[in-house]
Every structure is written in structure tokens, then in C-alpha cells.
Amino acid sequence: MKFAKGVVKSRVIILIVAISLMIPCLYGMLHTRINYDMLTYLPKTMDTVKGQDILMEDFGKGAFSFVVIEGMNNKDVSALAEKIRGIDHVETVLWYDSFMDVDIPMEMLPDKVYDLFNKGDATMLAIFFDSSTSADVTMEAIKNIRSVCNKDCFVSGMSALVTDLKALCEQEEPVYVGIAVALAAISMMVFLDGWLVPFVFLASIGMAIVYNLGSNIFMGEISYITKALSAVLQLAVTMDYSIFLWDSYNEKLTMYEDHKEAMAYAIKDTLTSVVGSSITTVAGFIALCFMTFTLGADLGIVMAKGVLLGVIGCVTILPSLILVLDKPLLKTRHKPILPKQDKLAGSIVKIFPVLIIAFLAIVGPAYYGYHSTQNEVYYDMGACLPQDIEVVRANKKLAETFNVASTHMLLTDSKLPEKETREMLKEIESIDGIQKVIGMETVVGPLIPEAMIPSEVTEMLESDNWKLVLINSEYAVASDAVNEQINEINEIVKKYDQKGMLIGEAPCMKDMIETTGHDFEVVNIVSIAAIFIIIMIVEKSALLPIILITVIETAIFINLGLPHYLGQTLPFIAPICISTIQLGATVDYAILMTTRYKTERRNGLDKKEAVKTALKTSINSIIVSGMGLFCSTFGVALYSNIDIISSMCMLMARGAIISMICVIFILPPLLLLFDGAIIHTTLGMKQKGEVLS
């Protein structure tokens, strides 16, 4: 109570401090680096990641790209290649003029080299950068390359992808927040009892969001997914806390004449309920930190921090705003639109056996769809972008013209004998789907002295410790075909060179597939276990956690099962994140109803009356909460052109509605069905040693 009274007394100071803190947080928000490369979140112990480091250390190369040029003569292409070589952080441009003077007929090149660079009226440049794939300087170099090329030049590769992704995110992200705020405000105006109330809530939540985004500067960088979703998610999951305080304040106003005293008691009550409610949400986000694919930790830490800041804002900034704006808030009140739910509650209790049967009928198909969806996700980052974006068109052009859908890079020990190297590369060339294998031993024949090879080519393909081989594949990144191809290449490489490493986008994606498949199981187990323990402690029951988690997990099965039945393919990260976010964010609906049910049973009501009372007093709160989460995410899902963002927001929006329906229609029948067992397994549910009747 001391804390609550201190907040009321210091309300003006709190608002001054809160507004002042916005300045450093805005600075932090603007200076937190955003990472657009998903592959950087792979575990550092993987060969693909180690190999990328070796490529940078030994060869001075990081990012790699192909540029396809159509309808340009050799001298103009050579001039263009020279311009590109002059761009900062372009380390090597490999083309025909790397091997011989441009005036010498191109047909004099070895067939393998000629075919690598030419197809009809199209030619291709291979570009290496001295910086990593998603480095800011690499993205700037991609922009500069495009600026010196004409419309018939197509820049492909991961660096081009992250460059286009960054531009699209920067264009769309302010709109995400605008849509979420607008729809959340409309939702609150409809479902709450005041026209001004939503804007006071949004001001308080908005400050907490800025604090969260600003404090991310201490993390060094965050992923673009985290940046795009964190503000929307924080708004969605912390809106309830503001509603708790407002409802409690209105209730206390009927008991106390002094508004300040009413608010002090409201803060005290809200702090207790909000802390309990937020723990499950925080646990859901913390579960993401157990992913070996560290994007989970990135999102989990930022969102857990956001929820905690939301709680602090709810019991400090929000009550201060309400007290300062008390008169206009009272003047702009309106009658609640949602009706009382006595009839619906009575009907649900009356037909509960039918609802039990319906529940049992839907669980099987929902779980089957849920399990199937996990195997139907996609990993190709290009697939999450609009098909008319520059990098997607470039990748299509590369695949259509040169039949190159992906490029692997092989690092082999420089001490491996040339004869064995040639045999190894010959075996790799024979693998299905391999288009070209470009290494020192394949570019030049065994009869050509190394002294005759241009230094640019030698430096690109050899270092003191390693040899570099480029392997062009006709199979798309993240496809089953390319993953099988990678297995075959690795098997051959290890036969000749145990130190050999296959790196590049496709091998990294293969590692990502294997890593995240395991992560899905781990995150589910951790989130369910953590939330089970929290509910067990809060409800002091062994059975209630099982019932509540069963209800929300059923909602998750339905939500993630629908894409299978609708023929939709989700980005790989969506099911992993949504399964734990939906559990953590919506299990509160079930806790709210269950807590009231326990109270009514303890007060002497029979099981049907207790469930009916819990239902009719909880339904409106659950609807308001569920619709808040829905409105905050649904508009973003419809607007976003980035499928990862769109899919995750659509799953969150749909998950809120499905969880809301499951809690209202499935939880009450289960409470009625297991009432006797609940009483026996819950502390405080027996009176004087006798079971409640």
C-alpha cells in the first residue's frame, strides 16, 4: 500500500520523469542496429558458420553475389565490371576479363569457364565482398552496384535479399504501429466505457514501448522480426493490464469518495493481479530463449522486457495520467456496449455434455493438422518477399538463364594433393543437379602452369591454408533436392578431406532446418512446463494446470492446424514462436475464469452455479482482452508484404479469437466434468475435512 500511495502522491513527478526518459530511449531506439540476416542466428559451432569465418579470415571475402547482364557487348561489360571493382567493399569481380584481355575472343576460354559466364546474349559477373552478408557496408555496396547498372542488370544473392528486405521493413514498420494503434483504439472505444480512455491507455503503453525499444541498444542489435513485431506485440499483450487498473479504479470509486484514495487501492489490487497475469506471458517469451537458433532469444528477451516495462508503466504512469486527466475522463464516459452474459453462461452450463463431445471430436483433427503444419513450413527467405521485388526477379533470372538456383562454396585443405582434389571435384560434378564446379583444378587443366593463371583468380581460389571451390546447383535453396545434394557432396568431401567444409546459403539453410526442428520440441516442452508450474503455484492445484493448458493447447492445435487444411505454407519461425506466445498470452483468460470458479465453490455454490457465475462475470473481460490482441495484430497481418511478419500476426490474431472461444465454450464443461477431482487436488477446496457438494 505504501507503493500505491507513493505513486498517487508523486503523480506529477512520475509523468515528468516518464516524459524525460523518452529522450534517451528515442536515441537508443534510433541507434540500435537491425539485423536482416537470419543465418547469423545459427549456432557458432556449426561447420557452415565456422567456414564463413574462415572465408573472411583467409580469403578476405564474406558476401557473394552474381550479377546477370543482358544485351551488352564485351567492352561495355568490362567497363561495368571495372566500375563495380571500384565500389567500396567489393573485393573481387570475376569475369572473362579476369582470365584474358577483353580483345581476345571469349571462345578461347576453357569451355567450363566460358559456359559459367555466358548464355545467349546474357553474361554473368561473380562478385565477392570484403564484408559479411548483412553488414551495413555490404548493403550500401549492393545499392551502389545497382546504381551503376542499367535496367538489364540483375543483382542476386543473400546480400541483395537483405538489402531489399531492409528497405521494405523501413517502409512498412511505421505503418504497422499506426495500424495496430488505430485498431486497438477503436476496439477499446467499442468495448470499454469511455471515448478518451483508449488514448490514455495508448499514451501509457506507448511510453513503455519506447522504453523497451530504446533499451535494446544494450543488446547491440536486434533482428528485423523482433523490431517489426515487438511494438505490436507489446501493445497487444499489455493492454489487459491497463484494463485491469481502469476496472479496479471504477470499482473503488463506488467505495471511496476521494479519487486519490480510490486510485491507491486500485493500484494495490492491480499490482497483485497484473504481476500474476504477466508471469505466464513472460514465461512464454523466456521459453524462446531455449532455442539453439538464437533468433528465439532475441525475440524472447525483448518481449519479456517489454512485458515487465508494461507492468511498471501500468502501475505508475497510467494511474498518474488517469488522475491528472480525471475530469475529462469522467465527462467522456459512455455506457458499455457489451451486454450481460447471463443467458449465454446458462446455456453453456446446460449443454455442457454436448460441448464435451464436440471438444473430443475436434481434438484429433486439430492435432493432426498441427503436426502436419510443422512439416509443411518453408525456409527460403526469398519466398517471404513480394515476387516483384528486385532480388526475387534477379534470382529468377539467374535460375532461368544460367540454371543456377543456388551456389555452394567448398573449402578444402590446401595440402590436399592435386590428384585427389581433381578426383573429388569430378565425383561432385557427377551428382544430380550440379551445374558447374569452379576451382583451381577445374578452371585450368593439369597441363597449364600455375604461373600463367592471373593473380586475381589465384588469390580468389587459394590461400595459405585453404582452397575455395564454387559449386553451382540447379536446385533451389531449402528444397529437399538441394538438401539431399548437400548430403552427397559432404559425403564425398569427407572421404577425401576430413577438414573440408561446405558453406553458403543452401548449406546454412539445411543447418537451420535441422536446428529449428529440434527447437520446436524444446520450446514447447519448456513453455508448457514453466506455465504448468506457475499455474500450479497460483491456483494451488495439481489438476487445474492440466485442464487449463489442455484448453489453450487445443486452441493452439486448431490455430496451427488450419494452415494444413487451408493449403497454406508458413515460414519456419512462425509455428515455433506462436505456439509459446499464444500459450503465454492467452492462458490468462482461463486463469481468470478458473479463479472465479474456485472462489464461488469455496463460497458454497454448487458446481453448476459456480461455473455459471464464473462464466457470466468473465466472458466480457475475456472478449475485451481477446479482441484487443486480435485488433492489434490483424490489421498488420493484412497490410504487411513480408510473409514472416504477415503470417505471425495472422496467427496471433486468429489464435486470440480461438483461445477466447475455447476458454468460453470448452473450459466450463471441463470444470464441471472434473469438479470432484479438482476439489480433491486443490488446496483450500475442502471445508472442515469434507468435500464440497
Image: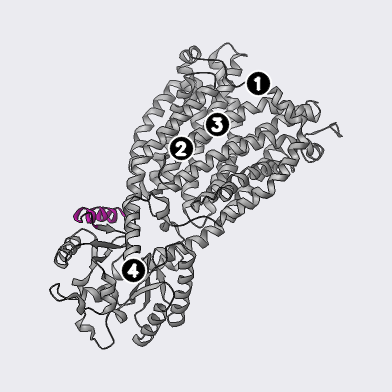
For residue 232, the mark is 2
Q: Magenta part mainly helix, strand or loop? A: helix
Residue at the disc numbered 1: 340
| In the foreground, 647 or 607 | 647
| Quarter of the figure with residue 113 | bottom left
State how the image is colored: one colour
Does dot 4 land on a helix, a strand or a loop? Answer: helix
| Quarter of the figure with residue 586 | top right
Point 62% across, 47% down: residue: 557
Task: Mark 2 or mark 4: name the one nearer the start of the chain.
Answer: 4
In front of the other: label 4 or label 3?
Answer: 3
Report the amino acid beneath label 1: Lys
Residue at the disc numbered 4: 55
Q: CA distance from mark 2 to mark 4?
A: 39 Å
Does dot 1 land on a helix, a strand or a loop? Answer: loop
Report the amino acid beneath label 2: Val
Point 73% across, 28% down: residue: 347
Q: CA distance from mark 1 to mark 3?
A: 17 Å
